[in-house]
Amino acid sequence: MKRALKNKLVSLSHEKDSRLILALDFLRAMDQASPLMLLNLCRSLLRDLRNLVVGVKIGLPLLLSVGVEGVKYIIYDYGDSFYFIADFKLSDIPDVVDYALGKLKEIGFDGVIVQLFPMGYGGVVEKHRNRELGIYGVALMSHRNGKLFRENFDLLVEYSLGLNLDGIIVGATDLESIKRARERVGDKLLILSPGVGVQGAEEAAAIRAGADFEIVGRSITLSLKPKDVARRIVEAERRALKG
């Protein structure tokens, strides 16, 4: 991982000696808890994981549960401790994505995940990277039936390089694709790999294959001992990096 240390995500990774990004999507008792209870649960979880986790990925499940103001509150409280990534899979015409990126930056997100299939995002990406918003394109999702992603994987990786993105998303459930992506992008793009744990990928396997970060959600957030699970994953990643 040879990206410039001005990148907040990379800086936090060096500071904490961790490659773990938390997917803060599903929480225990999510269907029964009030928005305030969920916010308190998020705050408690992030406080416990402050020294182990470098990034926090927030998707639609949490947004729809606590609202935009709730997400703002979380980022305001913990913006210095984590790199916050908006995972709403933006996929639209460039003008719509441009507007959405601006609003997500206003909320406080450090980075945003976009779908690459619509294409035409060159000027949009350049504009928002100049505003210090990291852009990450989905090259391969972590679920097993992503046929269109697999058929267009090389094209999506090439497009990501052409856009000069901050990184790409490549599911940890396909280690060969991670290896292929790393060979193609070298150190020009970060590789973030979701799918560790509940979706079947082994902890640290994506790191060994060439990913820079692993994204882990339910294995941690639904656990009765989330800090123990996170520590185990981070220690496995450290061993993998040492070879």
Image (cartoon, rainbow, N blue to C red):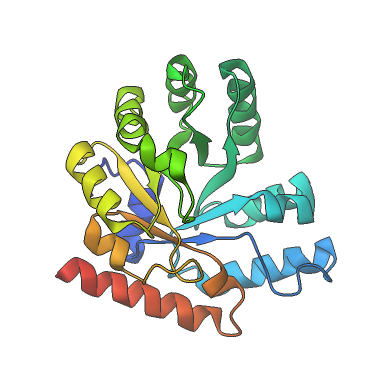
**Residue 190, image quadrant:** top left
Give the residue furthest to the left.
243
Question: What residue is shown at x 40% (from left), y 53% (from top)?
Answer: 171
**Residue 95, image quadrant:** top right
Q: Is residue 185 left or right of residue 149?
A: left
Q: Is residue 203 left or right of residue 105?
A: left
Q: Is residue 242 left or right of residue 111?
A: left
Q: Please tell me whether residue 237 is drawn above or below residue 177 in the rendered image.
A: below
Question: What residue is shown at x 50% (from left), y 68% (from top)?
Answer: 50
Question: What residue is shown at x 51% (from left), y 62% (from top)?
Answer: 22
Q: Quadrant of the C terminus?
A: bottom left
Q: Please tell me whether residue 112 is drawn above or below residue 215 in the rendered image.
A: above
The residue lying toward the viewer, choosing from 202 and 220, is 202
Residue 85 in percent (x, y) is at 53, 46
Residue 204 in percent (x, y) is at 31, 69
Residue 90 in view in this figure: yes
